[in-house]
Amino acid sequence: MGGVGYRRKHPGRAGMRCRWSPTSILRRLERAQIVSRIEANGAQADLLEMDIELFPFAPFARRVREFRSNLTSYDARYVAPAEAMDCPLLTLDRKLSRTPGPKCAFIVPAQPRPAGLFDGLSARAAP
C-alpha cells in the first residue's frame, strides 16, 4: 500500500476542514522551529495541490451527533463520512482507531510517530 500507487487507486476524500487543520499544524511546527519556513510553505503548496474531493458537513451531522458518547465532534466529522462512503479513515490517532462505535476501517502508520515530533502541540493537532 505504498504512496503514489495507493493514491491513484483510492482518490482522496475529506471534509471541508481537511485543508484548514494541516495549515494550523504547519503554523505551529514553524513557530516551534520544528520545520523551516521553506518546508512549511512547501507543505502548504503540496496540500493545496492534492486531488481531494471535499464534502460538506450537513449530510453527516446526524451521525456525528450519534457519536457524542464515544468521540469528540472533531473526530466524528472524519469518521462519519468514512462510514458513509464505506472507505477506511487514514489517521495518526491510534486511540481513535481503537474507539468502539465507528463502523469504518482505520489505517494507521505501522510505526508510532517519532518522539518529540509534536511535543508542545495540542493533542488534537497531533494525536
Image (cartoon, rainbow, N blue to C red):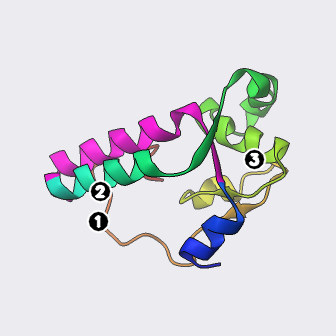
Q: Amino acid at mark 1?
A: Gly
Give the prevailing secondary structure in the magenta stretch: helix
Q: Which mark is residue 74?
A: none
Q: Which residues are magenta?
A: 12-37
Please indicate whether residue 17 sits to the left or right of residue 105 in the image.
Answer: left
Q: Rounded to the nearest whole Å, what is the CA distance between mark 1 and mark 3?
A: 30 Å
Q: Quadrant of residue 69?
A: top right
Q: Secondary structure at mark 1?
A: loop
Q: Which mark is residue 116?
A: 1
In this figure, which residue is indicated by the disc labeled 2? 119
Where 126 falls versus 24 (above or below)? below
For the residues bearing labels 2 and 1, Cβ distance under 8 angstroms: yes
Q: Amino acid at mark 3?
A: Ala
In this figure, which residue is indicated by the disc labeled 3? 82
Residue 64 visible here: yes
- The residue shown at (48%, 53%) is 127
